[in-house]
Image: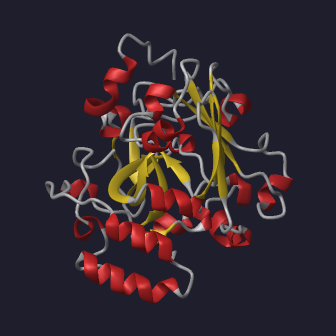
Amino acid sequence: MPIRRPADIRSSEITDEALYRDRRSFIRQAAGIAAAGLVAPSLLAACDRGRTAASEEPAPDDALTPFEDVTTYNNFYEFGTGKGDPAKHAGSLRVRPWTVTVEGEVAKPGVYDVDELIRLFPPEERVYRLRCVEAWSMVIPWLGFPLENLLKRVEPTGQARFVEFTTLHDPEQMPGQKRRVLDWPYREGLRLDEAMHPLAILSVGLYGRMLLPQNGAPIRLVVPWKYGFKSIKSIVRIRLVNRQPVNTWQASAPNEYGFYANVNPAVDHPRWTQKRERRLGEFRHRPTLPFNGYADEVGRLYTGMDLRRNF
């Protein structure tokens, strides 16, 4: 969901000008805070190798959400159900070492260290909107790489039709998992063609820094045309399957949360409207856009589908 088209963009266009006036300045400053553990050296090197390209300036209404809001107002029930709980409690999460298992209907299954993924697929900076089902949204400069890059590497078989993602299950590190508010571990899924769309990325950072635990460190999914709960955090397993997986929220409340979860202002949540949204940091509400504003890019994936029934 780039605010522009899904092209790569200059880091100077998407990061806070006060912190990063150009790419080389960002690298120098980030190297200084790497020692404090805010930026992984491997991520710095990969970002420096990442492709960049010029593009149009973002629309004025799509100003970046302040970093403080992005990192202190979160849904991550593994650390508590309150919006401020993840920032308070996620410090218990150990993000290194960390591996992601890719298995199922693939010719080349494997276990990847997250730093290996960063080396294999140098992250690019992309400005994406992320909209929550509770009618609030953010605009975030993510660091990541297309999910399709990893999927192509493992070579899906002809039986692969869906991709299932699983979050870490460790109640000692994720104290919210000690409560049965959901059926742990958290699971999400995409249709294979959705997962292979270039807008779907695996993110390892935001605002020029590695992901903080409350934002889904060390690696998470970002699917910008869907509601935020689809963008599963702290992934440890990716499994390609033949049958549609049952997602955590779908299992918990099937009348409220469907498999697709495409942003659709014409389909209200049973307990609130989805026609309008509010950006964090703003007071005014704005109309919700179909597919979160990415209809031109992803609408073809759902040709002929009843998007009220397939919500």
Q: Nearer the viewer, residue 143 or 100?
A: 100
Q: Residue at x 23, y 80 (%)?
A: 21
The number of discs equals 0
Q: Toward the viewer: 157 or 17?
A: 157
Q: Residue at x 67, y 61 (%)?
A: 98
On-image quarter of the N terminus: top left
Residue 102: x percent and y percent?
63, 41
Q: Quadrant of residue 22?
A: bottom left
Q: Is residue 65 left or right of residue 81?
A: left
Residue at position x 55%, y 40% in the image: 230
Can the viewer see residue 18 in this picture?
Answer: no
Residue 104, x across and y down, in percent: 66, 31
The residue lying furthest to the front in this view is 108
Residue 137, compared with residue 116, is above or below; it is above
Residue 142 visible: yes
Q: Position of residue 310 (x, y in %)?
A: 51, 18
In the rendered view, would you say 7 is above or below 283? Answer: above
Colour scheme used in the picture? secondary structure
Foreground: 35 or 245? 35
Q: In the rendered image of this protein, does residue 154 appear above or below residue 177?
A: above
Residue at 30% x, 38% y is: 293
The relative height of residue 53 versus residue 286 in the rendered view (above or below) is below
Task: Tell me where residue 302 appears, x and y as whole percent.
Answer: 39, 19
Q: Quadrant of residue 157?
A: top right
Residue 107 placement: quadrant: top right
